Amino acid sequence: MSLQKYEKLKQLYKLLPEGVVVPSSWLVEQGYSRQLIHKYVNNGILKKIGFGSYARAESPVIWEGVVLGIQHFAKLPFYVGGLTALGLWGFAHYLPLGNLNEITLYGEKNPPAWIKSLKIAQRLVFYKKPWFGSIGLKPYPTNIRNLDILVSSPERALLEMLYLVEKNGVTFGYAAELFENLTSLRPSLLNELLVKCESLKVKRLFLYLSSIYLHPWTKHINRDIDIGTGKMQIVKNGRFDKNYLITVPKEFHAA
């Protein structure tokens, strides 16, 4: 191998961390032609992960590496949220067994084809709603070269999870159990998120559950927010709560 080729390969290992998936466009931007990328694949230096995406061949791809590829290398505005974020912030013992087999990400746009075609152990699920912009996003450390990924805070993740109640496998009872154990949230951030929230379902569920589980932080929640006027069926064969205009399971309805 010539010195020039060796330096090119050495630079690749420096730029591309182990376990991270990057789009071919990023490799091209770093000065690696598509012909050279193809050669690296044939020589066992890179491996093709999906349509137009690559990783170092000697290391297994991990989901954190996929998220780093999306956020840091492809510069795409997707964030880890919902149930996955709640698990990362320490609420995993309240989550379904094997939750991290599914990684939930949020963004306003559709993910590009190279993300959809990834073949890794975890399933990546993308949601567009609810969307809160950059409010309540926090860096979360990974073991990949001390790089951080952007993850929804517990407050934001809670509201994202409430959007999925009674669909996507999140039952009302499960959401209530999780809510019951969220004893130390920041009301100022929740108030900011509720103002931004466009989902009447999320706002109604949040206010209802915060009236059932009277954590110390709930007394600082601004309850004077628009929740609409129409009735909303959250669960079938439940009881209607006139304060928040939703049907809830009979065992949760106040006498």
Image (spheres, rainbow, N blue to C red):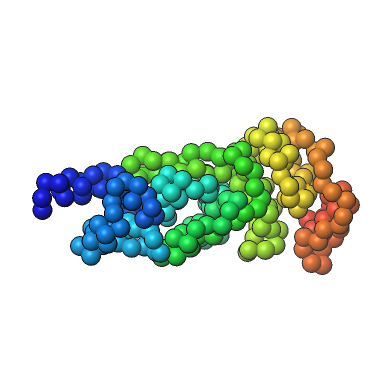
Residue at the spot x=82%, y=67% of the render?
237
| Residue 203 position in % (x across, y down) | 75, 47
- Residue 75 visible? The answer is yes
In the picture, measured across the screen, residue 18 lies left or right of residue 153, that is left
Instruction: Give the vertical position of 105 relative to 50 (above or below).
Output: above
Left or right of 41 in this view: 1: left
The residue located at (85%, 53%) in the rendering is 245
Residue 167: quarter of image:
bottom right
The reply to whether residue 161 is visible in this rendering is no
Q: Which residue is nearer to you in this view: 105 or 115?
A: 115
Residue 94 image position (x, y, % from top left): 57, 53
Q: At 49% across and 48% down in the image, what residue appears?
A: 76
Which residue is more in the foreground, 58 or 143?
A: 58
For this orientation, the residue located farthest to the left is 2
**Residue visible at 56% across and 40% down?**
137
Left or right position of 246 against 110: right
Residue 216: quarter of image: top right
Q: Position of residue 234 (x, y in %)?
A: 77, 60
Residue 211 location in percent, x, y? 78, 44
For the view shown, which residue lies furthest in the bottom direction?
A: 237
The total of numbered circles placed on residues is 0
